Image: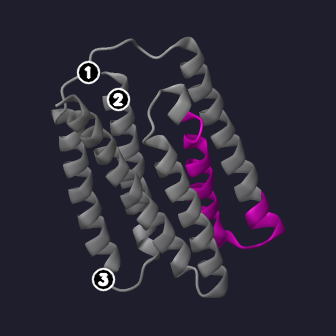
């Protein structure tokens, strides 16, 4: 699978996971509605990602792949350490999901340059801003805000997975 399609697929799967896992923290009938919408958005995103013609070009460089693996490793370590501190030191487990959204956002920042894919920059800053706003809202209100933050982050990932594919398709058309 070509790198852009692989990236769109990974982003779409990640977005779907955010939606499905965190919808349970929403009140009433919302978990069911949000999960159905998430599955529909995932199907649409995957259709957009897969319908694109595979662009000609060189595979990622070793440096790009090194950047990718360093970012992913740092992401895993940051999520685990941060979650541990949030849960054990601050005793605010509801904020863990906002931390995860923040770290996922930060991990996209080096990808824009490494893969010459500008779509990663607004994706990163969207998730970072969402995590900060959602964390503040969760502190000021209820844990539902944290769950909603993660669900919205999932839809953001799904949207950017599609958007990245559409932008490349429009540029090539």
Residue 16 in picture, x, y percent from top left: 36, 53
- The residue indicated by pointer 2 is 4
Check contact, mark 3 vs mark 1: CB within 8 A.
no
- The residue indicated by pointer 3 is 29
Determine the residue positioned at 43% across, 78% down: 26
Point out the tag, 3 or 2, that comes first from the N-terminus. Answer: 2
Instruction: Tell whether position 89 is magenta.
Output: yes
Label 1 Cα neighbours within 10 Å, binned few <14 / some 14-19 / many ≥20: few
Determine the residue positioned at 26% across, 21% down: 55
Q: Secondary structure at mark 3?
A: loop
Point out the tag, 3 or 1, that comes first from the N-terminus. Answer: 3
Q: Answer with left or right where residue 85 lies relative to residue 123.
A: right
Label 2 Cα neighbours within 10 Å, binned few <14 / some 14-19 / many ≥20: many
Colour style of the rendered protein structure: one colour
Q: Answer with left or right where residue 53 lies relative to residue 34.
A: left
Quadrant of the image occupied by residue 138 = bottom right
Determine the residue positioned at 32% across, 21% down: 2
Residue 58 in picture, x, y percent from top left: 38, 11
Instruction: Count the labels in the image.
Output: 3
Q: Which mark is residue 55?
A: 1
Q: Secondary structure at mark 2?
A: helix
Whether 47 is drawn above or below 116: the answer is below
Check contact, mark 1 vs mark 2: CB within 8 A.
yes
Magenta stretch secondary structure, dominant: helix
**Which residues fall within the magenta stretch?**
85-111
Specify the quadrant that holds the C terminus.
top left
């Amino acid at each position: 699978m070509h790198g852009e399609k692989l990236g769109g697929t990974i982003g779409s799967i990640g977005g779907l996971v955010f939606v499905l896992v965190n919808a349970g923290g929403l009140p009433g009938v919302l978990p069911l509605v949000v999960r159905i919408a998430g599955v529909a958005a995932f199907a649409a995103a995957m259709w957009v990602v897969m319908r694109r013609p595979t662009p000609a070009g060189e595979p990622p460089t070793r440096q790009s792949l090194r950047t990718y693996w360093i970012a992913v490793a740092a992401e895993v370590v940051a999520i685990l350490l941060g979650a541990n501190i949030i849960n054990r030191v601050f005793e605010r487990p509801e904020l863990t999901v906002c931390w995860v959204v923040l770290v996922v956002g930060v991990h996209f920042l080096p990808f824009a340059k490494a893969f010459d894919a500008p779509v990663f920059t607004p994706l990163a800053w969207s998730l970072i801003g969402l995590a900060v706003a959602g964390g503040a809202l969760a502190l000021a209100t209820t844990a539902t805000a944290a769950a909603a933050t993660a669900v919205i982050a999932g839809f953001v990932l799904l949207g950017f997975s599609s958007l990245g594919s559409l932008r490349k398709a429009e540029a090539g058309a």
